[in-house]
Image: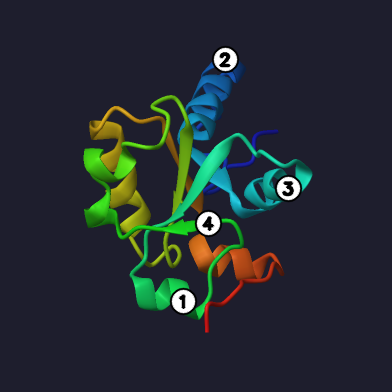
Amino acid sequence: MTVLNAVTSVPAADPETAARHARHLLSLESDCWDVHDALHGSEDPGFLLIDVRGPEGFAAGHIAGAINRYHAGLTDEWLADIPVDRLLVVYCAGPHCNGADKAMLRLAELGRPVKKMIGGITGWLDEGFELVSDR
């Protein structure tokens, strides 16, 4: 017997299509848990974490180990000392903010490998992780 509802009325994709889709998403995004785990798992997590909010937000509370650069300030000049193959992971305030998307676009257009940490500060705090403050 087939049950029809909002979930089942459109058939699921075949497993190959679902795997391709998931692989694509994971090539663009990471989540707070995985970033936290990587930052606390070794001396070099394999990426540079960039908080793309303004300096006031960063000073009020940010992820330990992150550097601050507002998305509009992501330029070739600013990136000059960062190896071109270094993965950059960007985050902003949270799902209500598109700063990380702007930063991701900017960095990709500059030819840099980049992922977005989905959830931003909101997601980080929702997971129970702490922020550090410069105040």
Residue visible at 38% across and 67% down in the picture: 96
The residue under label 2 is which amino acid type? Glu
Q: Residues within 10 Å of mark 4 (few under 14, many from 20)?
A: some
Residue depicted at 65% across the width and 34% down the height: 2
Instruction: Give the SS element for disc 3.
Output: helix
Sequence-wise first label, 2 or 1: 2
Per the model, the C-alpha gap separating discs 2 and 1 is 45 Å
Q: CA gap, disc 2 to disc 3?
A: 29 Å
Count of numbered tags = 4
Tell me residue 9's x, y (percent). 51, 39
Tell us which disc is closer to us: 4 or 3.
4
Circle nearer the N terminus (1, 4): 1
| Residue 102 percent across, percent down from the top left | 27, 50
Q: From the viewer's perspective, is the residue at label 2 or at label 3 nearer?
A: 3
Q: Earlier in the sequence, mark 3 or mark 1?
A: 3
View extreme (front): residue: 81
**Pointers 2 and 4 in contact (CB under 8 A)?**
no
Mark 3 is on which residue type? Asp
Circle 3 or circle 1, nearest the eye: 1
How far apart marks 3 and 1 lie (CA) works out to: 23 Å
Q: Please tell me how crowded label 3 is: few (under 14), some (14-19), or many (20+) other residues with Cα within 10 Å.
A: few
Q: Quadrant of residue 99?
A: bottom left
Are the two marked residues, 3 and 1, in contact with CB atoms closer than 8 angstroms? Answer: no
Question: In whole angstroms, how far apart are the C-alphas of marks 1 and 4?
Answer: 11 Å
Using the image, tell me which numbered label, if any, was put on residue 82. none
Q: Which residue is situated farthest in the right direction here?
A: 41
Mark 2 or 1, closer to the camera:
1
Q: Residue at label 1?
A: 59
Query: Looking at the picture, which amino acid does disc 4 mark?
Result: Ala
